[in-house]
Image (cartoon, rainbow, N blue to C red):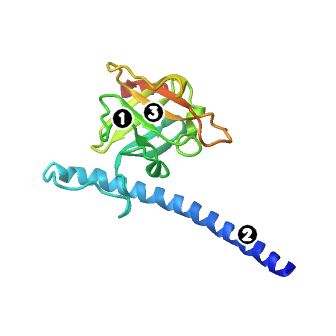
Amino acid sequence: MKKYSIGLIFAFAIYLLVNSFYMVAKAHLAQVLLKHTWQNVLKQNVLKQENKKLRPLLPWAWADFHLVAKLTFLRFDLSHIVLNTDSGQALAFGPGLTRTNTSNVDDITIISAHNDSHFNVLEALKMGDKVLLEDNQAKRQYYQVDNTLIIDTRLSQLYIEDSYQGLVLVTCYPFAGVISSTPYRFVVQATPIDSLALVSL
């Protein structure tokens, strides 16, 4: 009986080890596929000018999202591919658009992501940090972080004035929380700047 118990424990430990390696490998492979697909999206959009019936490219056949932008935190030289939705399944692979299904760098863009993966960088952002958003038409817009706030979704919702033009990044708060579900949101607001302002970097 004792040998049988030890065997079960050993088998379970092996299962956990293999599963953890599988999850890590899956996450890395997903990012490789997203970056590869993003390059193809930029190329395909040249063809879309002639044939508008082309469907969005998917990183894998069963993906229920497509790629709409690339977000880069310049001080950290860190980039993420932005997806067209912030559904639970999509956020496992990257940040997602919250308000619209198409990225428009001339208007307000709200992007959300998990604070223990793609948006853990928000904790280290400082006022004045520069962010680059490139849409799937290869159009670029630079932003400068000018405000952060924490909201309690039990008391109020994120409100952005219609006249506001900028980038809003949202993630759960606190960053080192032991409970995955929290009513608090950490919000970063960034306003558009001209690329000439980057000389201060």
Considering only vertical position in the picture, is 95 above or below 104? below
Query: Comparing marks 3 and 2, which lies closer to the viewer?
Result: 2
Q: Residue furthest front?
A: 1
Residue 143: where, in percent of width, then height? 42, 28
Read off the residue under disc 3: 131
Number of dots carrying numbers = 3
Residue count near mark 1 (Cα–Cα under 10 Å), binned few <14, some 14–19, many ≥20: some
Q: Residue furthest left?
A: 50
Residue 104: where, in percent of width, then height? 30, 35
Considering only vertical position in the picture, is 27 above or below 187? below
Considering only vertical position in the picture, is 112 above or below 21? above
Q: Nearer the viewer, residue 168 or 180?
A: 180
Marker disc for residue 99 = 1
Read off the residue under disc 2: 13
The residue located at (23%, 50%) in the rendering is 45
Label 3: which secondary element = strand
Residue 115: where, in percent of width, then height? 57, 40
Residue count near mark 3 (Cα–Cα under 10 Å), binned few <14, some 14–19, many ≥20: many
